[in-house]
Image: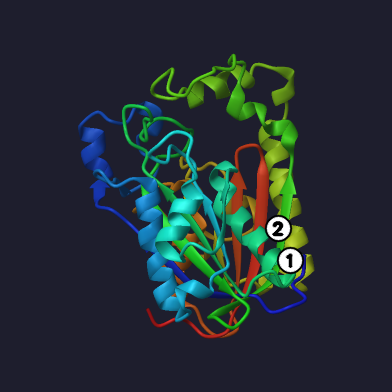
Amino acid sequence: MRCTKDVFIAATATSLPGLVPIGQAEAQGLTDEMHTGLGYDSIAVSDGVAGPELAIAAGREAIARSGLPAQEFDLLLHSSLWFQGLDMWGTASYVANETVGARAVSMDLQQRSCGGMAGVHLATAYLEAGYADNALITTGDNFAAPAFDRWNSQMYTIFGDAGTAVALSTRGGFARIVATTAFADNSLEGFGRGSEEFRFAPGTEAPVPVLRRLAQHVQTPAAADGWERIEVAMLKTRDQALSDAGVEQGDIRRAVLPFIYRGQGQRENWDALGFTREQTAWDFGRTVGHLGAGDQFAGLDHMAPGLSEGDRVLVFGVGVGFNFVATVLEVLAPPCW
C-alpha cells in the first residue's frame, strides 16, 4: 500500500528497565547450552513493573516528543507478546486512558512479535481514511519467571522487557510513511502450536513450553520446508513494500529488523533481506534482547537521531503465525531528542 496521503512518524519512545549482563546470566546458569553465545551483551529485565506500565511510560514520552496535545490522539493500538498483568481485561483501554485519555478508540492487537508493526500498518490506513489525525501505537511486556523463561523459551532468542511507542500524525513528523505492506502465511501457524491439546484455563503449565511445541511440529509433514517458506514470505513482503514505495533495495540506507541472532555463521535476517549488519539496529538490540512486539519501535527510536534528511529506512516485522509487515520511511529531518 503506497500512502496517497501524508502520514508521518511524529515521535518514537522507549521505556527500558535495568540491563543484566549476559555473562552474569550465563555464569548463574540461567541460559542452557542452546541459548549461550547468541551474541547478546545484556538483557533488559524489569523488576516489578508490568508490561502495560512500561507501555504507558513510553507512550507518554512519545506524546511529549511529538508536541501534539494528548487529547488530540483519536486512536490507540496496543500490542504485547506476553501476560499483561491481569487475566481478562482491556489492556489497551488502560494504556489509552493513562496516555491519551478517555475518548480515544483503543484496541489490543495480538500477532506475537509482529504486533507493533501491525499497529503501524493498520493505523496508517485509519489515518489515511480520515478517521483520525493522530494515533499512538504502544507495546509493553515483562517476561517474568516462573510462568515464562525469558532465557530459554525460543530458538535464537532471549527476551527483554520494555515499553515502546510510536506516534503517527497527518500533521507532520520527522519521517514520512511512504508505503506499508502486510503479508501472511497462516499455514505456518503450527510452529507455535505443535500437537498440544487445547487447555481451558491459562497458566496450567509453567514455564510455557514454546520449544516443545516447535519440536513437535517439525516432525510433521506440515512443517516441510518451513524455514524456506518463511524466508520466501519475508522476501515477498520486502519486495512489495519497495515496489509500493517506488524504490530499489539500494535506495534503503538503514533497516530495523527483529532483535534475533542465530550466530555461528548461520544466515541472519539481515542476510535474508539483503542488508548488512551495519545497516541494522542490531548493535543496540544485542544490549536489550528481543522486546516482544517492540523491537522495531525501540530500534527506530535508537536509530532516529543519527539519520539524515532524505534517508530511506525499511522497518520490518515478523510474527509467529506467520505475519509479516514492511514499512518504508523517508526521513524529513532527524529528531533532536
Residue 220: x, y in percent? 69, 17
Q: Is residue 209 visible?
A: yes
Q: Are dots 1 and 2 in contact, CB under 8 Å?
A: yes
Picture residue at 36% right of the left edge, 47% below the top: 161
The residue singled out by tag 1 in the image is 242
Q: Is residue 49 left or right of residue 118?
A: left
- Label drawn at residue 238: 2
Report whether residue 258 is seen.
no
Q: Quadrant of residue 326?
A: bottom right
Is residue 63 or residue 100 the one in the foreground?
100
Q: Secondary structure at mark 1?
A: helix
Cα distance between the residues tagged 1 and 2: 6 Å
Q: Quadrant of the C terminus?
A: bottom left
Q: Judge whether 235 appears above or below 130 on screen.
A: above
Answer left or right for 203 relative to 2: left
Q: Residue at x 54, y 45 (%)?
A: 113
Counting every numbered tag in the picture gives 2
Give percent across and percent down for residue 74.
58, 68
> Of 311 and 202, which appears nearest the observer?
202
- In the rendered structure, which amino acid carries the disc numbered 1? Leu
Q: Amino acid at mark 2?
A: Arg
Quarter assignment of residue 257: bottom right
Q: Which residue is found at the position 33% from the left and 36% from the top? A: 144
Considering depth in this image, is 67 or 277 the residue closer to the camera? 67
